[in-house]
Image: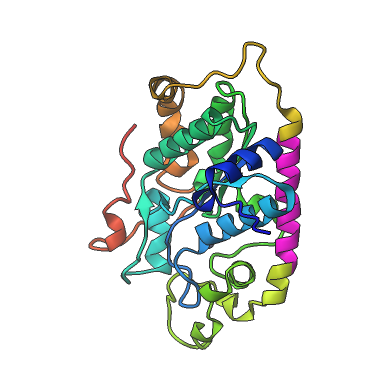
Amino acid sequence: MRHEVRWERMFPDELDAALAACPVCYLPYGLCEPHGPQNALGMDALRAHAYAVRTALACGGIVAPPSYWHIHDFGIYAAWAESRIGQARSWLTAVPPWQWFKNLCYHVRGADALGFEAVIGLTGHAGPHAQDLAFVQDVLQRHFAARIALVPCTRITDAPMAHAGAVETALLWATEPDCVDVSRVPPPDAPGPHFAMAPDAGQANRREGERLLDGIVSRLGGIAKALLADYRAPAAGRQTMPFAELERIWAAEIEPELPNFYCMQQERRGGGEPPPAEGSQWRLNWQVPAP
Ligand SMILES: [Zn+2]
């Protein structure tokens, strides 16, 4: 029998039944970003989406359409890219931090408005924004009945994840085999950079990816279960937040804090990347706007 958990592929009766059975919404995030010559660009969102789909199939819930636009080409992300990507065409699907975080707020609002009791935002893209999620989660949680968890994928596995290295490649291989081609890993002595690939990428092992994936699915299922257990229906009933109220919350509670976000710092706190060279493609948005 058909068992679909991907929102955009479901019929209305299936969505209603899935919500009634398990009111958990997964919001997967990533972007197209260089991940070595051996991985498809969509790596981060492909993984986040696949983790959510496998968890929903096992534990219930609905997986929202993945968002493939995320923070990059900016500030310390640009400085990071200077040595890893160089002047190659990046094929990034990048937006600045304020754009991404505001979209995230709207996505959470949308899930709450539909009656979900637990909302899990899952970002496959790593970076300093991961440290800003807790703040945004706290702000949103004060205003919504649904229980909210904003989770970086690096927190649901203990495996160390070098960018486009053996572990990340193995996880994509386990989840989306068509999106990995290890024959494209360059020979060890080939001069780099190799489209942001980590040096250990050639050791990627699909079986190891599958083993790690089992652990990820069980951690994610645990988060969903804990959020549902924490949910309390408001005594006055669920209220749907209008767009105008979300704009008010954004302007009053999040926007003023943006200059303090980790992802808005020019350099990683406690040591950073050197500035991109004059004339580099990474110089354009490297300088963070003054608060
Ligand atoms: Zn990645």
Q: Residue 137 occupies which quadrant of the picture? A: top right
Residue 213 belongs to magenta span: yes
Instruction: Work out which residue is located at the far top of the displayed protein and give it.
Output: 236
In front: 44, or 286? 44
Query: Measuring 47% from the left and 70% from the top, which residue is drawn there?
Result: 40
Quadrant (top left, top right, bottom left, bottom right) of the C terminus: top left
Query: Measuring 63% from the left and 77% from the top, which residue is drawn there?
Result: 204
In front: 196, or 173? 173
Q: Main secondary structure of the magenta part?
A: helix
Give left or right: position of 82 versus 131. Answer: left
Q: Quick check: 24 above or below 144? A: below
Q: Residue 163 occupies which quadrant of the picture? A: bottom right
Q: Quick check: 59 above or below 280? A: above
In front: 228, or 270? 228
Q: Quick check: 181 above or below 288? A: below
Expressed as whole percent of the image width and height from the top left, the position of residue 207 reads 72, 75
Residue 152 belongs to magenta span: no
Magenta region: which residues? 211-227
Quadrant (top left, top right, bottom left, bottom right) of the N terminus: bottom right
Give left or right: position of 6 versus 74. Answer: right
In front: 120, or 199? 120
Instruction: Work out which residue is located at the far left of the displayed protein and give it.
Output: 279
Give left or right: position of 76 versus 153. Answer: left
Expressed as whole percent of the image width and height from the top left, the position of residue 123 reads 55, 50
Determine if residue 154 is in view.
yes
Expressed as whole percent of the image width and height from the top left, the position of residue 239 reads 54, 18
Query: Measuring 58% from the left and 71% from the top, which residue is drawn there?
Result: 169
Expressed as whole percent of the image width and height from the top left, the position of residue 287 reads 31, 47
